[in-house]
Image (cartoon, rainbow, N blue to C red):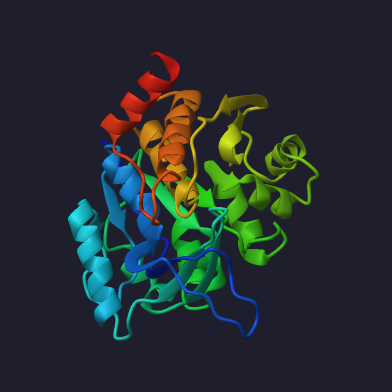
Amino acid sequence: MPKMLHTGQVIIDLVMAVDQLPQIGGDVLAQSAAFEAGGGFNVMAAAVRNGLPVVYLGRHGSGRFGDLARQAMKDEGIHIGIQMPAQRDTGICVALTDASAERSFISYIGAEGEVTGEDLNSVAAEAGDYVYVSGYSLLHAGKAQALLDWTLALPEVINVVFDPGPLVESPDSPLMRALLPRIDVWTSNSVEALRFTEAADIAQALDRLADHLPKDVLMVVRDGPQGCWIQQRGERRHVPGFAVKAVDSNGAGDAHAGVFVAGLAQGLPAHEAARRANAAAALAVTRWGPATAPGAAEVDGFIRESCGD
């Protein structure tokens, strides 16, 4: 069975639900507040819950937040590849979800913002594995070059999955120009794809992404409640979403990405993996919190109930 090697960042989210964000200098009362493992944890949890073994190949810190991160990964069955905690603590993100289910983030990077080649070689990548690379990692001076060098040295039999995230805005940086030819799977939401390609719509974004990426790359672009678009070797397909009442969009894209990769690793065709990912994301937005991806049995049941399969 292939595994996922996740090279991104596990941080701790302070999750707060508010009616609306305060004005500058203002104050609002939250309906709830909790510390939860977040960041890359959400993708990994989604993948594990859907049958894909996962190794975390990022650093984790010494302190209360590092302890929370390690315990959360242990509880999910995620293997921690880099055993020794760093001297500084794991970082934190304040995640605010308003009444429209939209979320806003303020992040502080800790131990997870650094890594070495020796760290990344703590666990061997084997044929068929999926190495998950986050665009956030390319923004950290203590991590980006080591991660890029390690990724580019991987054998071609290792699948590289790239999630640009909201802060990687173009293909023009030296790091992105080096990484793009090595990507096997691109996963992003529509806003990220449009910004990255400066496209007017998803169709144009997919065309422009294809110009930057290898000819066999599998692209998936999420389109919110409408589902997602997939494209490979010039063949494009819309995979419809599922109608639900959203209460919190935090972590929905991560649920989609984790379940999509799990489906691919289990040999599903891309459109079937995408349908399962759409179902997982739909269920995730009906729940509060960042790591709300359902397990495989719940995804199966939801699809049967929704589609009569």
Please give left or right for residue 274 compared with residue 202 in the image: left
Residue 231 position, x and y percent, is 62, 30
Residue situated in front as seen by the camera: 205 or 20: 20
Residue drawn at the location 26% of the way across and 37% of the way down: 51
Residue 157 visible to the viewer: no
Please say if 118 is above or below 89. above
Residue drawn at the location 45% of the way across and 70% of the way down: 30
Circle count = 0
Residue 186 position, x and y percent, is 56, 44
Residue 290 position, x and y percent, is 40, 56
Residue 38 figure quarter: bottom left
Residue 93 figure quarter: bottom left
Residue situated in front as seen by the camera: 113 or 247: 247
The quarter of the picture where the N terminus appears is top left
Please give left or right for residue 92 compared with residue 237 in the image: left
Please give left or right for residue 178 compared with residue 301 in the image: right
Please say if 102 is above or below 189. below
Residue drawn at the location 30% of the way across and 32% of the way down: 298
Residue 20 visible to the viewer: yes
Please give left or right for residue 70 compared with residue 214 in the image: left
Residue drawn at the location 24% of the way across and 59% of the way down: 73
Residue 196 position, x and y percent, is 70, 54
The quarter of the picture where the C terminus appears is top left
**Quick one: which residue is furthest to the top in this view?**
308
Please say if 151 is above or below 58. above
